[in-house]
Amino acid sequence: MTVPFLRWLALAGVLLGAGTVPGCAYRSSYRPKSEALQPPAVDAAEVRVLPEGIAAPDHAIELGTYRGRAPTRDEVIEAARRRCGEVGGRYLLVKSQRPRDHARAWELEGVCAWTSS
């Protein structure tokens, strides 16, 4: 009687554990470079995403560093755009973007930048 119960308990643990796949959670952090510059927030749609290797305009000022994780590539980019927009960034300079945990999640590291024009 106890053996079937232990098997059921082990199976339940496996099934419950499968629902919490590591790496699928949304996570993000933002570290401001300076508290002195605080431009007004902009809509996420106004934030231009510049891929790796593309430089920001010469007159752009770095606001801070963003790091995030999401289940898909598009979701991680949208989360970064929203956060950069909240702090007034007009540009998201992607420093690195890669799949993690066998493509169960995407990570992005970037810089939010602001320009006066």
Image: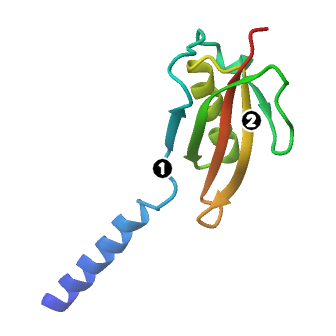
Q: Residue at x 70, y 40 (%)?
A: 74
Q: As rendered, which of 117 and 107 lies closer to the eye?
A: 117
Q: Is residue 28 above or below residue 107?
A: above
Whole-percent x and y of residue 77? Answer: 68, 37
Of the 4 image quadrants, the one containing the N terminus is bottom left
Residue 1 visible in the picture: no
Residue at 57 percent across and 15 percent down: it is 37
Quarter assignment of residue 117: top right
Q: Amino acid at mark 1?
A: Ala
Amino acid type indicated by mark 2: Leu
Residue that numbered label 2 is attached to: 93
Q: Residues within 10 Å of mark 1 (few under 14, many from 20)?
A: few
For the residues marked 1 and 2, what is the alpha-carbon distance in whole angstroms?
23 Å
Depth check: give the residue in front, 16 or 97. 97
Which of discs 1 and 2 lies nearer the camera? The answer is 2
Q: Which residue is mark 1?
A: 25
Q: Specify which label sits upstream in the sequence, 1 or 2.
A: 1
Q: How is the image coloured?
A: rainbow
Q: Secondary structure at mark 2?
A: strand
Callout 2: 10 Å neighbours few (<14), some, many (20+)?
many
Q: Which mark is residue 98?
A: none
Image coords of residue 15 (percent x, y)? 37, 69
Extreme-left residue of the structure: 1
Give left or right: position of 108 versus 1.
right
Lateral position of residue 48 relative to residue 103, left or right? right
Q: 109 above or below 48?
A: below
The location of residue 36, given as percent across then percent down, is 53, 16
